[in-house]
Image (cartoon, rainbow, N blue to C red):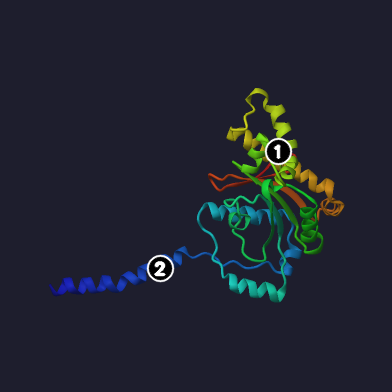
Amino acid sequence: MLKMIRLIMCITLLLPLVGFASQASMQVIPSKATTAAKQESITPQRALELLQQGNQRFLSDQLRSYNYAKEMKMTVKKGQHPLAVILSCIDSRSIADILFDQGLGNVFVARVAGNVINKDMLGSMEFATKHAGAHLIVVMGHTECGAIQGACVGGAVGNLKDIFASIQPAVTFVKKAEGQDFNCESSTTVNAIAKQNVLNQMQNVLNGSSVIKALVANKDVEIVGAMHNLKTGKVEFFNIDGKVIS
């Protein structure tokens, strides 16, 4: 009986230690806001790699820990120096900061339904790159996009008509490519339009901004497209020709 009591006491004492060890093994590296030195030294390709790595952490449920209050104080004191500017859709499930596991001060994020380009977005990108030093522009769409399907079906009223008009060239392109298989209710069709829309908007960035075009020509900035799969969480990157970037 005495031996049994001692055994129970030993187990009771060890359990907290086991729990602590388990928690320690699960801890991840704390997030740190990008510094001016890191931003200046990094290449567009490295900025992309950091986003890819962040998405991999998201997929494997290994997100970094964050102290937002501490990061806020640091970025207010030392300024912001993000590595990339990301244009994405307003869909509540497609949030770039989370998908790429980035904290405060790491990325500029602009959001609008259908991730379309307009003068406000171009001005924001020019600020983020030319004036604030970001080296990468990402135009990110996502699967099963309501704005894309809406543009496909048509019939918008109010200001939404302008957004649908920006997406319409992608609808026309895919409709011609798919022929009789074209179906606005099909996820295959909607996702094809979404990707083509990203490619079109990437080209609109270059056509609409001589500032960004010059930065790209000098290889100070790179523009890439991306598609976020809502079902899996994976983000696939591709260049302006649609070729996947591994």
Graded by Cα atoms within 10 Å as few (under 14), some (14 to 19) or many (20 or more), the crowding at tag 1 reads: many
Quadrant, the N terminus: bottom left
Q: For the view shown, which residue lies furthest in the front direction?
A: 158
Q: Say which of marks 1 and 2 sits in front.
A: 1
Q: Is residue 63 visible?
A: yes
Give the residue type that dot 1 points to.
Gln
Give the residue type that dot 2 points to.
Ala
Task: Choose between 184 and 170: the one closer to the eye.
Answer: 184
> Count the marks: how many?
2
Tell me, for residue 223, which label it has, or none.
none
Quadrant, the C terminus: top right
| Quadrant in the picture for residue 84 | bottom right
Provide residue 150's location: percent of width, then percent of height.
65, 39
What residue would you read off at disc 1?
196
Provide residue 42's location: percent of width, then percent of height.
73, 61
Q: For the view shown, which residue lies furthest in the left direction?
A: 1
Q: Is residue 38 above or below residue 200?
A: below
What is the spatial separation of the Cα atoms under label 1 and label 2, in whole angstroms? 49 Å
Q: Is residue 37 above or below residue 210?
A: below
Could you tell whether 192 is left or right of 11 in the image? right
Task: Choose between 67 and 43: the one closer to the eye.
Answer: 67
Graded by Cα atoms within 10 Å as few (under 14), some (14 to 19) or many (20 or more), the crowding at tag 2 reads: few
In terms of secondary structure, where does tag 2 sit?
A: helix
Pointer 1 or 2: first along the chain: 2
Q: Is residue 240 visible?
A: no
In terms of secondary structure, where does tag 1 sit?
A: helix
What residue would you read off at disc 2?
21
Q: Residue at x 79, y 48 (%)?
A: 205
Q: Residue at x 79, y 43 (%)?
A: 203
Provide residue 218's location: percent of width, then percent of height.
85, 53
Q: Residue at x 53, y 51 (%)?
A: 59
Dot 1 and dot 2 residues touching (CB under 8 Å): no
